[in-house]
Amino acid sequence: MIDRVLDPMVYTSSYPNPTAYTFLSHHYKWKIGSRNVMNFLHKVQLHGKDDLYRKGGGHTFFVPIDHKTDDYKWENIDGYIIEGHVVPNMVLFTRPTQRNFIFETAANGDYIYIVLSLVTSGGKDFVKSHTILGNSNHKKGEVLSEIVKANIPVANGVVHLIKQPLAVFDRELKPFPYLPVFYKVASDPNLSHTFNIGRRNRMNKIFKNESALYTFFVPTNRAWRNYLNYTHHEQGQILKRHVVVSDSRLSMAKLAILSKNGGGEATLNTLDGTIKLTVTQKNGTYSMTWNNRSIELSRPDYECSNGVVHVLDDVLADVRTSSDTSHDSERVSFWGALKNLVL
């Protein structure tokens, strides 16, 4: 029983009885503004917790949005943390739920035990997690997260969107944990040709912008062997296709999820326009395909302080049409604006 009429959230009839998992995997069909939950969906799928969100009955699901959450926190979300975002067998709408009352989550085992409570402060609603039992990877203590979109009804309960993940604490800073993308590429002699292309075309400067995160598919020196007769400009145009600027790192695991959710292809906005990749995982090994061609991965997932580098033993270009100015799609206007900032 609730004490008010709920705002309509779904604007499509494609899902007559959507579960919490339907919401996670098709959140863009709900009227939730520009909010995105792809990072949390990726973690749910990665740790095999899909059934927790598909389970029938009535449950409460707290779902963190992607906005401005430290990558360190996403990296530390595991199965226990995901369970700590679900109150099973209770449907908790914000207004009638008693404040500061403890609710047991699905993370209620002998080694990890997390409880939640609702708190109101300054006219805003928050959810507070309290890790009562933990270990070296799950610290004891409390985390407070603002509820930014409450009371989204689903067939198996209610979903509340929250500002940051629960039960995950801030990074304990250590000196120089990672190199920036620029210095990773500059310091690796096996990537010197890519670095020199970026230098000649004034691309390297963009990696010094600390307000964005970069995913850089970096060809090795050997990978460029079939493109050495191209002009510096042509090589620069090809290299732009290897850089994605966004608000999150695109790890191989995330690219595999994007490929799966995209019908077999992940569509990426690069500095040269959109490209489509297919990333799959088998027995712990990732494979990548571009333009119907298998791309050999020399070293994926080299984490940097401002992004991630995937070292390739290939180039995302067709040798036979390298001088052709056509691309996977029209160039995005973003590159032109960004280039004006750095030149």
Image (cartoon, rainbow, N blue to C red):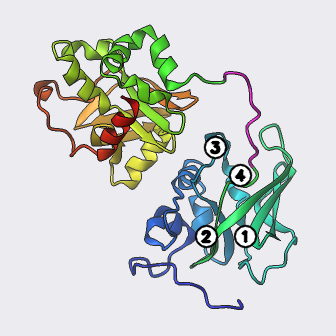
Between the residue at mark 1 and the residue at mark 3, the CA separation in whole angstroms equals 28 Å
Report the quarter where the C terminus lies. top left
The 10 Å Cα crowd at callout 2, few under 14, some 14 to 19, many 20 or more, is: some
Q: Observer-nearest residue: 306 or 39?
A: 306
Report the quarter where the N terminus lies. bottom right
Between the residue at mark 3 and the residue at mark 2, the CA separation in whole angstroms equals 30 Å
Which residue has dot 4 on it?
81
Tag of residue 55? 2
Q: How many marks?
A: 4
Within the magenta stretch, is there residue 332? no
User: Foreground mark, 2 or 1?
Assistant: 1
Which residue has dot 1 on it?
88
What residue do we see at 54% from left, 52% from top? 45
Which residue has dot 3 on it?
70
For the residues labelled 2 and 1, say whether their Cβ atoms are less than 8 Å apart.
yes
Q: Secondary structure at mark 1?
A: loop
User: Foreground mark, 4 or 1?
Assistant: 4
Between the residue at mark 3 and the residue at mark 4, the CA separation in whole angstroms equals 16 Å
Between the residue at mark 2 and the residue at mark 1, the CA separation in whole angstroms equals 10 Å
What residue do we see at 57% from left, 69% from top? 20
Q: Is residue 36 visible?
A: yes
* Magenta stretch in the rendered image: 168-176
